Image: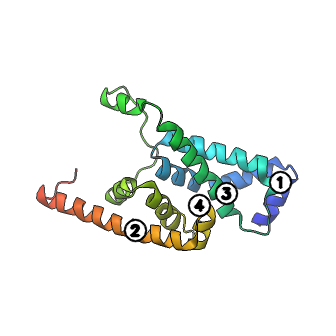
Amino acid sequence: MEKDVIVRVKEGDKQAFEQLYNEYAEYAIRTAFAITKNSADASDAVQEAFIKVYRSIIFYDEEKPFKPWFYRILVNECNRITKCKSKVIPIDQYLDDHSIGSQRDDYKFEEYEELYAAIQGLKEINRIPIILKYLNNFSEKEIAEILDVNINTVKSRLFKGRERLKQALLKMKEGREKNGGKNF
């Protein structure tokens, strides 16, 4: 079915592109949010990724799986936006500090708050493979294609990321126990 939709998109069928968008947008926004740590940046990254998909779909080989190709574009957009943002003064932090109604995240992660916090605390080099593997169920091979690195590099980053997650979660647990079970 996906192959048929992509062929129709290549032929200029806007409804087929809308179908493709609807199929990938929700997971794309979650992935982008996990990478950029910001709802607005995540939305921008997803929008830019779909624009790039639309403009370059003609070069896409429909014999290959679409999802890794799309996520490579998405991750690159997230990285581009994050890199640009690092050069800007963070106004969100100012607004939060001064209680001027800043918009909060649309996604609720209460169930996995500690895990989410630990993932967000990882360095990008480990965070992105962890997100792609466990949030989006990509294989190591697909992650290697998305990130344009060797599969062994992906395996190493996933291993180190899992180890760092374990350490962060243990520290959080110890902190809770020191504070009498209160979760901060």
SS at mark 1 in the image: helix
Residue holding disc 4: 147
Q: Please state, as top left, top right, bottom left or bottom right, where the N terminus lies in the image.
A: bottom right
Mark 3 or 4, closer to the camera: 4
The residues tagged by marks 3 and 2 sit, at their Cα atoms, a distance apart of 26 Å
Whether pointer 3 and pointer 1 mark residues with C-beta atoms closer than 8 Å, the reply is no
Q: Is residue 77 left or right of residue 183?
A: right
Total marks placed = 4
The vertical placement of 42 against 31, above or below, is: above
Place residue 119 in its image quadrant: bottom left
Q: Is residue 80 left or right of residue 70?
A: left
Three-letter code for the amino acid on which mark 2 is drawn: Lys
The residues tagged by marks 1 and 4 sit, at their Cα atoms, a distance apart of 22 Å
Of callouts 1 and 2, which one flags the residue occurring earlier in the amino acid sequence? 1
Q: Nearer the viewer, residue 25 or 59?
A: 59
Of callouts 4 and 2, which one flags the residue occurring earlier in the amino acid sequence? 4
The residues tagged by marks 1 and 2 sit, at their Cα atoms, a distance apart of 38 Å
The residues tagged by marks 4 and 2 sit, at their Cα atoms, a distance apart of 17 Å
Residue holding disc 3: 70
Mark 1 or 2, closer to the camera: 2
